[in-house]
Image (cartoon, rainbow, N blue to C red):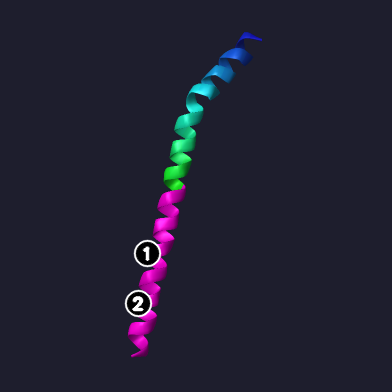
């Protein structure tokens, strides 16, 4: 029972950090995808001309 309470309190303390890390990773992934798409678009249109 005590371990359960400790575990839940630890999860409660760590949750904001986990959500912040998850948000940062998601933001980085979306930015990377956008950069890749813009580079591909540039190469595609650059090669066409």
Gap between marks 2 and 1 measured at Cα: 10 Å
Residue 34 is inside the magenta segment: yes
Against 49, residue 6 (above or below) is above
Residue named by callout 2: 42
21 sits left or right of 1 in the view: left
Against 46, residue 40 (above or below) is above
Seen at 62% across and 9% down, the residue is 2
- Magenta highlight: main SS: helix
Seen at 36% across and 71% down, the residue is 39
Seen at 35% across and 77% down, the residue is 42
Quarter of the image that includes the N terminus: top right
Seen at 40% across and 57% down, the residue is 31
Element on which disc 2 rests: helix
Element on which disc 1 rests: helix
Residue named by callout 1: 35
Counting the numbered discs, the total is: 2
Instruction: Give the label on residue 17, or none.
Output: none
Instruction: Point out the stretch of residues depicted in magenta.
Output: 26-49
18 sits left or right of 31 in the view: right
**Image x and y of residue 44, in percent:** 39, 81
**Image x and y of residue 37, in percent:** 42, 69
Residue 37 is inside the magenta segment: yes
């Amino acid at each position: 029972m005590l371990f359960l309470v400790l575990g839940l309190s630890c999860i409660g303390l760590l949750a904001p950090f986990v959500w912040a890390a998850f948000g940062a990773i998601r933001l980085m992934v979306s930015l990377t995808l956008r950069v890749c798409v813009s580079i591909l678009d540039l190469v595609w249109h650059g090669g066409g001309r």
